[in-house]
Image: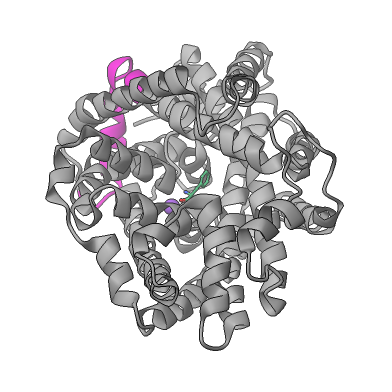
Amino acid sequence: MRDQWNSKLGFLLAAIGSAVGLGNIWRFPYVAATNGGGAFLLPYFFAIITAGIPILILEYTMGKTYRAGAPVTFARINRRFEWLGWFQVMISFVIAIYYFAIIVWCLSYIGFSFTQAWGNDPTRFFTEDFLGLTDSALNLGGINTSLLLPFLLIWAVSAFIMYKGVSKGIETVCKICLPILFLMTLILVIRGITLPGAVDGLNYLFKPDWNALKDPGVWVAAYGQIFFSLSIGFGIMLSYSSYLPKETDVVNSAFITATANHGYEIFAGIGVFSIMGYMALQQGVSVEEVAASGIGLAFMTFPTAISALPALNAIFGVCFFGALFIAGITSLVSILQTVVTGFHDKFEVSHKKAVTIVMVPSFVLSFLFITGAGMNILDIVDAFINNIGIVSAGVIELILITRFFDAEKLRREANEFSNFSIGRWWIYTLRIVTTVVLGMMIVLNTREYLANGYGGYASADINVFGWGTILFVVVFADVLTTMKGKDGYRDLDKISY
Ligand code: PHE
Ligand code: NA
């Protein structure tokens, strides 16, 4: 028997748990601020309406109709589409491996918050004392023994959740974790907006630069943020919705998921940037000088800000790193589940066996990220997997479904159980607008990486961990597609629209 969510609310919480991740806290505010500020909200909402919600509806409809992970779902749609499913699964597999590492860092930093162990030079502390960062991604420099304990702990916890399964494991965890995440964020936002300097931070985030709208790069950035933030295009939402009853209203589910994710994103952005505004005021510099994103924001800039707070520093540190930690865990389980169900559905192994097949190799490979080269490898893999991998998976999905398949069938299926009927615009936006923007993104990103590499890394590093990762994903997708499955896609006849 295939697992099923206990309730629609449980499914929604899990989907929101997947969507709300590190990207909401450390990626969105920076992307918005540097791409037109308040004016960015225009392309951002445009992308939500033309790509975010339509693709969520598409993936939810496919999942609940074909009731399988990405490989078998695409195979049930058309036997020749199976490769795309494995391509998406392999992308998820890669992300899962480095997501582990970031969560490990967050857990350590929850601990450091109590004493502000980072001292007065958090950047040096993070790179040298904490990570023992080497000079190149190819110079591994040995395993970081101080990371071993949190590493094994998080590993054990995620294995436990995954073995428990979708309804008993993931659903339960999300029900407990999301309210805590919201509470921690609320504490940060209230503290943030009541600090001196908060207004400067918020101004930096929201002050509109209307000229930015003429820059195609800003529109591409908006689409990039939506894809990453909603976890769409690489099989995650499709897998989660495959545990839904067929009668579910997926149209309203898509609206709820998107509203919660983007609402949280803007909310967290207010907290993060008001605290940065305070910090800039303390240091007598402009917000622009302290603004950062990603790893830099979380582990270099924010520790400084936490130490600079007037009181209760430890509590706010725990709230910030705790929020990152929880947002990370609830996303990690969704990426892992995407891979697990890929194997479970094609090879008809038991749930436990599928979890073992996924967890053992990801455990072994994730050691790479607790070596001295971990952060550099992570940075490169993340850029290539997001900016080339996910976008390609998304555009191939749209092309296959809207041009080589009668997407009208999916529209009818979605509408049959929905109060709000989606019109034909749905197919046209996906087929034309979204496909064109994503295609443009792939061309721009690939050209940029081929011409200038990435992040100033040596070309050997880029070849091995950037292009190498893409090659790894493609080769394994080929192999897994060729392997003979047990399923035989025999449920095919039972599917109606
Ligand atoms: N959507 C998550 C975020 O915004 C990131 C994520 C990526 C989640 C991949 C699942 C899988 O941070
Ligand atoms: Na998100």
Location of residue 109 in the rendering, given as x and y in whole percent from the top left corner: 67, 65
Residue 341 seen in this snapshot: no
Q: Residue at x 35, y 20 (%)?
A: 443
Q: Which residue is drawn at 36% across and 18% down?
A: 400
Location of residue 355 in the rendering, given as x and y in whole percent from the top left corner: 74, 41
Q: Nearer the viewer, residue 263 or 56?
A: 263
Image colouring:
one colour
Q: Give the range drawn in magenta.
A: 398-420
Task: Residue 65: say if magenta.
Answer: no
Q: Nearer the viewer, residue 2 or 307?
A: 307
> Would residue 447 appear left or right of 336 to someone viewing this image?
left
Name the quarter where the C terminus is drawn. Answer: top left
Residue 213 seen in this snapshot: yes
Q: Residue at x 40, y 70 (%)?
A: 280
Q: Residue at x 68, y 13 (%)?
A: 483
Q: Which of 340 and 361 is in front in this view?
A: 361
Location of residue 365 in the rendering, given as x and y in whole percent from the top left corner: 76, 35
